[in-house]
Image: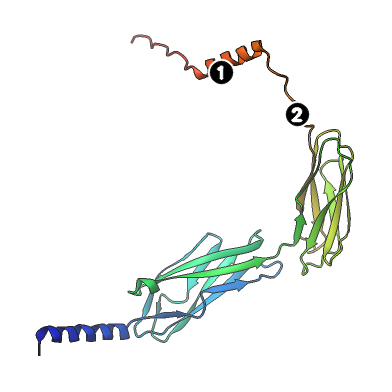
Amino acid sequence: MNKNFLKLIGIVALTALAQGARSELKWEQTSVDLKPALGDKQAVAHFKYENVGKTPVHFKSVHASCGCTTAQTQNEQVAPGEKGEIIATFNIGGRTGTQVKTVTVQTDDPDTALATTVLTLKAVITPLLELQPALVYWQNGEEPKPKIITAKANKDAAIRKLDVASSSPDFTAKVDAGSAPNEFKISVRPRDTTKAVYATLSIKPDSPANAANIFAVAARVLPPAPTAAPASTPAIKSTLSTIRHDLATPAPTVASPSQ
C-alpha cells in the first residue's frame, strides 16, 4: 500500500479522534431580559452552561463591560458532562430606562469561533416618576398663561400626592389629577413675563414613605430679543479694520539682554 496513502489515513484518523475528544461548552441562553422591581438595588442574570464535549473546559477570563456590572464563575474548570452558570450582577444605582450590559467569556477551546462568548444582560428599569417636558418657558412679553408638565408615576409606587416647590416666587405651581391612572398635571404660571427669570421646581412624591426622592424641572421667562445693531459708519469700519489687523499681527520679539 502506498506510504503516502497510509499517512493520509493516519492524519484523518487523528483528526477524527481529536474532534471526538474536544471540549464544547453549550449555553442554555446567552441573553437575559430582566425587569427589576421598584426599589431593587441590583439586577442579577444567570447564564447556565454544560460541557457537552469529551475533555475539560477551562475559563481563561470573564470580563464585564463596565464597572457597574460584576461576573463570576462557579468553577475555573468544567469537566465533561458538568453543568454550571456564570452570575452577572448589575448594580442599578440611579439608572433608569433600558440598560444593556455585556460579559465576555473566554475559554481554552482551540476553535476560535467557540472560544469567546458574549453574554448580554438587558434590564428595563422604570423610574419612580417620569416628567415631560423638563422645561417650560415663555417668550418675553408673552401672555402669562399656565403651561403643563405631565408627571407619570410608577404603578407600583402607590403615589397619591405630589408636592411642588419653586425656587423663585416669580413662578407658581399647582398639581391636579391627570386623565390617566397614576398621572398628574403640574400647572406652572409666571407672575410676570416682562423680565427674564428662571426657577427650579422641586417635585416630591408622597411614596415610598421616608424616601428622599426629589425630582426637578425648570421654568423660565426668556430675555428680550436683541435689537438689530446700527449700520457701521466708515469711521467705525476703519477702527474695526485696525483692531483686526493689530490682533492678527504678531507682537515684535524683544531681544534678550546680553549675558
Residue located farthest toward the top when viewing the structure as drawn: 258
Q: Which residue carries the number 1 mark?
A: 244
When asked about the image quadrant of residue 98, the answer is bottom right
Q: Is residue 18 left or right of residue 116?
A: left
Amino acid residing under circle 1:
Arg
Residue 41: horizontal and vertical position, in percent? 65, 66
> Can residue 210 be spotted in the picture?
no
Report whether residue 48 is seen. Answer: yes
Residue 226 is tagged as 2
Q: Residue at x 76, y 65 (%)?
A: 154
Spot occupied by residue 91 in the image (x, y as percentages of width and height)? 60, 64
Q: Split into 4 quadrants, where in the image is the N terminus?
A: bottom left
What residue is shown at x 50% (from left), y 68% (from top)? 71
* Quarter assignment of residue 38: bottom right
Q: Is residue 74 above or below residue 137?
A: below
Quick one: label 1, few (<14), some, or many (20+) residues within 10 Å?
A: few
Q: Which mark is residue 209?
A: none
Q: Amino acid at mark 2?
A: Pro
